[in-house]
Image: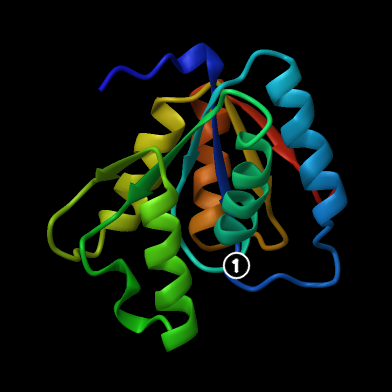
Amino acid sequence: MIIDKIKTCAFTGHRTLKSDYNKTELTRVVKTLINGGFNTFLIGMAVGFDTECFKILEELRNKKQIKIIACIPCVSQDYKFSTEQKAEYKRMLNSADEKIYVSKEYTKTCMFKRNMFMVDNSSVLVAYLNSDRGGTYQTVNYAKRKNVKVIIINE
C-alpha cells in the first residue's frame, strides 16, 4: 500500500475522554483538514478518542472522498475490550477502507510501533492530550521530533 504522507493525517488520544474533550472542535479540525486536501486518515483503533475520530470520519466519508485506514497494533488488540467495545471494534474494522496490522502477536512495543507507523506516514497528527505521560504523550513528542505538525484539540 502506498500512503501519500502529505495528504495523510493520524490521530492519537486517551482511552478515557474527560470534560475537556470537545467533539465539535474535533469535527471542525477534521473538516478543515479535508477541505485543505487531506484524504487519508490513520486510526489506531483503540477505545475512547480513536473510536470518536473513526465515527466522525465515517460520517464525513459519506460526503467526501476520504479513506480511513485502521492501524492495528496486533491481532488481539480487542482482548481486554468489553463486549460492547468488541462489537463496535468489529463494526469499525469492517467499515475501514484498509487495515494494517503492525504485529501478529501482542508485544510490549506493538502499540508504540503502531503509533510510530502512523506518525511516520502522516504530515499532521491530531491529538487529544491531557497527561504528560503514556502512549499519547510519547506519540505527540515523537511527531514533534519528526517535524510532523501536531494539532492538540483540547488546548
Quarter of the image where one finds residue 29 = top right
Residue at 58% in and 42% down: 140
- Disc 1 crowd rating (10 Å Cα; few below 14, some 14-19, many 20+) is some
- x, y (%) of residue 80? 35, 83
Task: Name the element at disc 1.
Answer: loop
Q: Seen in the image, is 97 located left or right of residue 88?
A: left
Quarter the N terminus occupies: top left
Residue at 54% in and 16% down: 7
Q: Seen in the image, is 124 located left or right of residue 84?
A: right
* 69 w.r.t. 5: above or below: below
So how many labels did they put on this image? Answer: 1
Question: To which residue does mark 1 refer?
Answer: 48
Q: Nearer the viewer, residue 17 or 88?
A: 88
Q: Nearer the viewer, residue 65 or 139?
A: 65
- x, y (%) of residue 3? 37, 19
Q: Seen in the image, is 30 located left or right of residue 70?
A: right
Residue situated furthest front in the rendering: 62
- x, y (%) of residue 97? 39, 38
Colour mapping used in the image: rainbow
* 73 w.r.t. 77: above or below: above
Residue at 48% in and 58% down: 135
Residue at 42% in and 75% down: 87
The amino acid marked with disc number 1 is Gly
Q: Seen in the image, is 15 located left or right of residue 106?
A: right
* 65 w.r.t. 116: above or below: above
- x, y (%) of residue 71? 36, 46
Residue situated furthest bottom in the rendering: 83
